[in-house]
Amino acid sequence: MRDSHFEELKSICNILERREDLSAYTTDGSRISVIPACVALPSTVKEISELMVFASNNHIPVTPRGAGTNVSGGAVGDGIILDLSAMNHVAVHKNYAVAEAGASLGDIDRISMKHGKFFPPSTETLGGTIGGLIAVNATGWRRVRYGPLVEWIDGMEVVFPDGTTTYLRKESFFFRLILGSEGLLGVITRVRIRLHPTGSRYLVRLEMEDMNEVFECIRKFHGHPFTLFLGVEDHPFAVVEVSKDMRIRNQRFCVEDAENLNAVMTHAIRRIYDRGKISFIEDLSIPENRVIDFFRVLKDLEDKYEVEIPLIAHSGGVIHPVVTGQGSRILREKLIEKAVEMDGWIAGESGIGLLKKDFFRRFTGEQLSLLRKIKSLIDPAGIMNFGKFLDI
């Protein structure tokens, strides 16, 4: 970027350009490091629209970013990082809420619960933003009970690369294109989400002796939100969200607070870290009934590559193998290949980003050229999230 570019950007919105200010934006949850040219800090949709026109006219890449929790390298880039965190207002109405893209999932839940409601698709990463959630189409662990993310989004406001601002209703064709597009087609700025009564739900922690009990747990609680922890402690355990009128027999359990999955996940990761350096945490999806099969595959890979791979698995089939020791790209490739072999996919709830763009191209096949044609129509300058899995 030229000096004149920085001056023009400053006339549009606040920007960061000093190297020490950019350091917080060079990476995200993936640990991939890319130094941006600058960071834009818009506070209004108008500023985003003007910035998009400027970037398109000058062919400068734009990478939308929320909280930077993405673990696939989707929130880093070498052009303009568009930090949406300041646009975080949430307004709760009777059965829905209107939230700006930078609003965190934790804030949405906290504000909604004051009205006796909650947003079911929230993931365990409550620090993530609603814009990021929609960008990667991450439904979270409650999908099996409440349905996919699309059922809880009534519409979204999007700024396209030419600066056009449009509200897309759920029924529209472009809504489906933007959902899960990882910022490759436009910038999500505001969303209308549906809320659900909180009801009487709580967590139980189920302790299990062996894999037979794990299989029984998956069978028994099919249709209930649960997270399995295999290889994290001496014995498998699960956290299951149930209603208070459900009786649990023949299982050892203790009651947990219904909002504590994030704390349980954090504690589990710390337990794993205490045993050795975490090389990487993978994000994949497989059919729910293949979780035990996948864990057996992990045991074989542990012996072959001399690592430990505990598994965190959510209901619905989103899984997170946690590789400790000397992980490698070859091992990551094996994990991804095994997931695809089991009729799964290369990502679960964190998208493709930079990390998996080669795998996406490998497993997408003939659809890739069609996707590129769609992107070239919407983003002819190719500025949106440049360098990711759908370059033109």
Image (cartoon, rainbow, N blue to C red):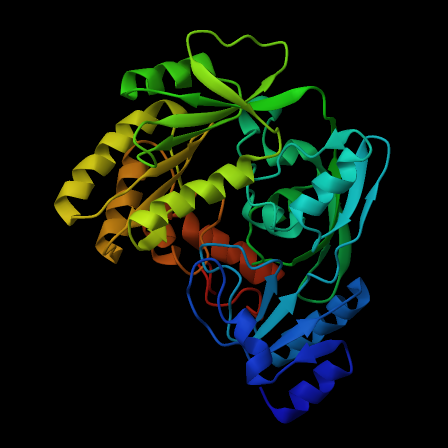
Whether residue 363 can be seen here: no
Image coords of residue 152 (percent x, y): 68, 34
Residue at x-position 62% and y-position 25%: 146
- Residue 213 drawn at (x, y percent): 33, 16
Viewer-nearest residue: 227 or 93? 227
Instruction: State the residue in front, 123 or 58.
Output: 123
The reply, left or right, for residue 117 in relation to residue 344 is right
Residue 321, image quadrant? top left
**Residue 72 in sight here:** yes
Where does residue 194 sit, x and y in percent of width and height? 74, 33
217 over 141 or under it: above or below:
above
Image spot of residue 258 (x, y percent): 61, 28
- Which of 241/98 is in front? 241
- Rendered image quadrant of residue 159: bottom right
**In the picture, which quadrant includes the N terminus?**
bottom right
Outermost residue toward the left?
304
* Residue at (43% x, 54% y) in the render: 369
Please give left or right for residue 256 compared with residue 173 in the image.
left
Q: Judge left or right: residue 209 versus residue 51.
A: left
User: What is the tally of numbered marks visible in this picture?
Assistant: 0
Q: Residue at x 30, y 26 (%)?
A: 292
Kindly identify the residue that appears in the image at 75 percent across and 62 percent down.
164
